[in-house]
């Protein structure tokens, strides 16, 4: 036997979702005082030190303008990284770490070029784990892959926060 109660619940959820759909605005929509995409494309990323900084600056530059045409920069993004590795698992027989975690904190500041006004600032953080073995090269490559995953995650966090600050300004 079927009941009509689940159908009524589904219909009420659907109707409330439709009613609320007009309350949300897409982040990258060209409305308001500023176009978020155009503002993001005008961000210049200052060089970031170390290997993970290289990966992060490439990810940020691509996510801001999508690899498209160069635009004259209106903003400058500076990022300071702090990286550390933890080994949470130790093999009790060999005394060697069997896993590692690369933890990265990124302090970022987006300044307007010329005026020096702070547009956005904050700290993003991430962690990526990897397996360790008795092979040295495999450990180095696994740690580098973890750094690349961290860089992608940090770039996504920073890009989203900066886009939200542009959208809220407009």
Image (cartoon, rainbow, N blue to C red):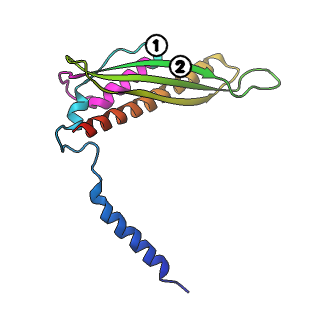
In contact (CB < 8 Å): disc 2 and disc 1 = yes
Rendered location of residue 46, percent (x, y): 32, 16
Queried whether the magenta region covers residue 126, the answer comes back as no
| Residues at marks 2 and 1, CA–CA distance in whole angstroms | 10 Å
51 vs 60: above or below: above
Q: Residue at 32% across / 38% down in the picture? A: 164
Disc 1 is placed on an element classified as helix
Is 165 on the left-hand or right-hand side of 94?
left
Q: Earlier in the sequence, mark 2 or mark 1?
A: 1
Q: Which residue is mark 2?
A: 83
Q: Which mark is residue 144?
A: none
Quarter of image, res 137: top right
Q: Residue at 29% across / 56% down in the picture? A: 23
Question: What's drawn in magenta, residue-wise?
Answer: 53-75
| Mark 2 Cα-neighbour bin, 10 Å: few <14, some 14–19, many ≥20 | some
Disc 2 is placed on an element classified as strand
| Quadrant assignment for the C terminus | top left
The number of discs equals 2
Q: Which residue is mark 1?
A: 50
């Amino acid at each position: 036997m079927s009941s009509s109660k689940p159908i009524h619940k589904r219909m009420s959820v659907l109707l409330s979702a439709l009613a609320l759909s007009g309350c949300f605005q897409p982040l990258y929509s060209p409305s308001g005082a500023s176009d978020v995409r155009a503002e993001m494309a005008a961000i210049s990323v200052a060089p970031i030190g170390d290997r993970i900084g290289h990966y992060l600056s490439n990810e940020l530059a691509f996510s801001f303008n999508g690899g498209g045409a160069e635009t004259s920069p209106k903003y400058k993004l500076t990022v300071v990284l702090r990286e550390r590795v933890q080994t949470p698992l130790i093999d009790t027989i060999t005394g060697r770490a069997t896993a590692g975690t690369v933890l990265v904190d990124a302090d970022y500041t987006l300044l307007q070029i010329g005026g020096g006004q702070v547009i956005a600032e904050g700290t993003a953080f991430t962690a990526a784990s990897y397996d360790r073995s008795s092979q040295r090269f495999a450990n180095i490559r696994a740690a580098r892959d973890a750094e690349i995953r961290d860089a992608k995650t940090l770039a996504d966090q920073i890009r989203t926060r900066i886009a939200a600050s542009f959208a809220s300004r407009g």
